[in-house]
């Protein structure tokens, strides 16, 4: 894909959150441990999307109800001990558990001077509440769209539509930046949007629109 003609019309940038802007050291560990306790593999894409449907596609007061609903759907026998153990695993975080990547804050504030910025994330409401306490995201982003607010998760096209609506732009003058190849990159491309992969661990060297640090975005925006 050529960088020349499409990029000059860019007026806004939509960012993924986890793995793109912020991270949590135990995030994946919590999900892996939860999956193992019920005999599942977090790397199984179908299981992961089912988990997101129950936990991240609507606002939840706590993790207990969606945990029980997921187990019922999977026909997994459970008792109070298992429920408590699973909920305890998911609750193992605080606002201080989350960190912003070193390159994120400075790059975002520079971009904010020229572009409309939106956030689009698949996230549970309890986790996002903690993130909201930790970071002043409203000072950075012009629009924030969480999966639990719109009752769907990426790569559903409705999620990308909601993010565009949040900043009043069209897919033709916005780029999407994220770290997940399926949810973020393929999702945005299937929606008809230009996508840039933030590949911090160098897993997809073959993908053309790829960066390893956020400051590299400027080569696409020049």
Image: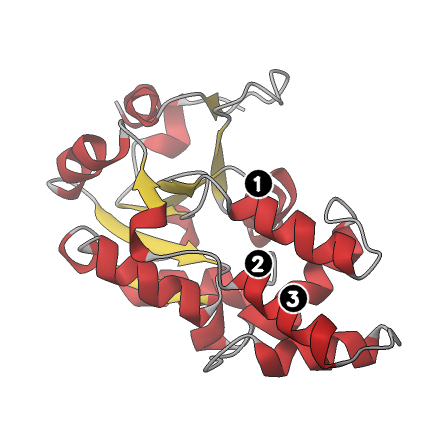
SS at badge 3: helix
Residue that mark 2 sits on:
154
Q: Are marks 3 and 2 in contact (CB under 8 Å)?
A: no
**Which residue is depicted at the point 33% across and 27% down?**
214
Circle on res. 86: 3
Q: Are marks 2 and 1 in contact (CB under 8 Å)?
A: yes
Say above or below: 170 vs 55. above
**What whole-number distance in Å separates the C-alpha atoms at marks 1 and 3?**
25 Å
Q: How many marks?
A: 3
Say above or below: 145 vs 180. below
Q: Is residue 87 visible?
A: yes
Q: Is residue 189 visible?
A: no
Mark 1 or 3: in front is 3
**Which residue is depicted at the point 46% across and 65% down?**
161
Pick the front one: 172 or 119: 119
**Which residue is depicted at the point 18% across and 50% down?**
140
**Image quarter in which the C terminus is found:** top left
| Residue 169 percent coordinates (x, y) | 31, 58
Residue that mark 1 sits on:
180
Q: Are marks 1 and 3 in contact (CB under 8 Å)?
A: no
Q: Residues within 10 Å of mark 3 (few under 14, many from 20)?
A: many
| Residue 56 percent coordinates (x, y) | 54, 69
**Which residue is depicted at the point 49% across and 46% down?**
193
Mark 3 or 2: in front is 3
Q: Earlier in the sequence, mark 1 or mark 3?
A: 3
**What whole-number distance in Å separates the C-alpha atoms at marks 3 and 2?**
24 Å
SS at badge 1: loop
Pick the front one: 39 or 195: 39
SS at badge 2: loop
């Amino acid at each position: 894909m050529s960088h020349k003609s499409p990029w000059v019309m860019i007026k806004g940038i939509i960012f993924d959150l986890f793995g793109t802007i912020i991270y949590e050291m135990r995030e994946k560990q919590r999900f892996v441990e939860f999956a193992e306790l019920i005999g599942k593999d977090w790397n199984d894409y179908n299981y992961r999307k089912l988990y997101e449907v129950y936990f991240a596609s609507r606002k939840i007061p706590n993790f207990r109800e969606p945990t029980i609903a997921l187990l019922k759907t999977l026909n997994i026998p459970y008792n109070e001990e298992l429920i408590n153990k699973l909920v305890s695993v998911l609750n193992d975080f605080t606002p201080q558990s989350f960190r912003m990547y070193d390159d994120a804050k400075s790059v975002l504030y520079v971009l904010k001077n020229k572009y409309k910025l939106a956030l689009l994330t698949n996230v549970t409401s309890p986790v996002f509440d903690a993130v909201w306490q930790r970071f002043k995201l409203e000072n950075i982003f012009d629009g924030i769209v969480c999966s639990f607010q719109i009752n769907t998760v990426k790569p559903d096209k409705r999620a990308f539509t909601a993010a565009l609506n949040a900043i009043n732009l069209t897919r033709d003058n916005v780029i999407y930046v994220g770290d997940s190849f399926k949810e973020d990159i393929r999702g945005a491309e299937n929606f008809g949007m230009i996508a840039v992969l933030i590949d911090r661990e160098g897993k997809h060297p073959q993908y053309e629109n790829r960066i390893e640090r956020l400051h590299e975005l400027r080569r696409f925006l020049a």
